[in-house]
Amino acid sequence: MIRQETATDWVLITHPDHARLAGRFADAWGNERFARPEPYQDIRYAVYHHDDGWLARDAAPSLTPAGLPEAFTRTLVGAYSAFEEIDLPAYLAVRARATAEVAEVNPYAGILVSMHTYNLLSEQADLDSIRPEHRDAHARFLDEQKSWQQETAARLGAAPEALLRGFEFLQCCDNLSLIVCSGYEQPRTLRHTHPDADGVRHTIRCAPAGADTYTLDPWPLAPDELELEIPCRQVPKAEATTTGAFRAAFAAAPVATRRVTLRRAAA
C-alpha cells in the first residue's frame, strides 16, 4: 500500500494502482524536446507491472506492530530504510515475485524490474536498518538478482546502454508516482537525469503547486497539462484496530478516485 491519513481515516492506494499511474506517466512521456526510450513497449510493460508482486499482499493487508497499515509513506520518499514497514524476508519475497511475474511475460521488462529491485535494496536502502540475522539473505538475494539479469541480458542480446536507460526511465516514473500517491509536500528532483533529443541530460524537478497538483521542470510530457485519476480507499482508523478488522474494513471500503494534475512550471 501507499498510505496517507486524515484525522479520522487511512487513505490507501495499492501498489499495482500506483504502478499503473507510473505507467500513465510513461504513456505521456515524449515531446519535441524529450524522446521516449527504446525499446519503448518493453520498457512500458515494466513500468506498468513493476509492482505486480504486491497483488496478494495488498489484497490481504496487515498492520505494523504500531497498529498502522503496512505501507509506503511520504517519509520513505528518497530514504528507503524501512522496506515499506514489513520484515525483510517478506519484502524479498514480494520483490522476487515482482521480477518473476514480469519476466514470465516479457523477459526484457523482467530485467528492468530486477534492476529496479536491486537498486531499492542497495543504493536506495539504508543498509544499517537490516537486522543482523537477515544480512546473509539480503546479500544472497542481490547476488541472485544480478546473476539473473546478466544471464537473461546475454540470452536476449540486450544492449547494456539500452537497459540502463530503460531502468532509469522506470525509476523516474515510479518516483513521480510515489511522490503523487504519497502526497509528498516538498520540491524534489526525480530519480536520474534524462536525455533530450540531442542527448543532453537534464535533472527534472517536481514541485507541489496546490492540492494534488504538481509541476515538472523541464517538461518531458506530450500534453501541456496531464490530468489523471488514482483509485483509493478510505478506511476509518476506528475500524482498523486489529488485522482482521482492518482487512474487513478495507475490503468493504468503496473505491474512490483522487484526481491529480501535472503541469508545466511557470516560466
Image (cartoon, grey):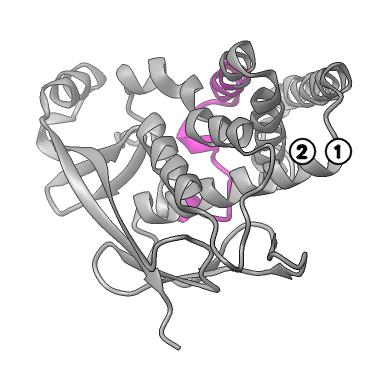
Quarter where residue 224 is shown: bottom left
Residue sticking out furthest to the bottom: 267
- Cα separation, mark 2 vs mark 1, equals 5 Å
Q: Does the magenta stretch include residue 78?
A: yes
Front-most of 17 and 244?
Answer: 17
Q: Is mark 2 on a helix, strand or loop?
A: helix
The answer to whether residue 190 is above or below residue 174 is: below
Quarter where residue 75 is shown: bottom left
Query: Magenta span: helix, strand or loop, mainly?
Result: helix
Residue sticking out furthest to the top: 104
- Where is residue 22 drawn, in percent x and y? 46, 44
Mark 1 neighbour density, 10 Å: few (under 14) some (14–19) many (20 or more): few
> Split into 4 quadrants, where in the image is the N terminus?
top left
- Kindly tell me whether residue 170 is visible in this rendering: yes
Residue receiving disc 2: 163
Which stretch appears magenta? 75-98
Front-most of 213 and 41?
Answer: 41
Residue receiving disc 1: 160
Mark 2 neighbour density, 10 Å: few (under 14) some (14–19) many (20 or more): many
Residue at image x 69%, y 28%?
114
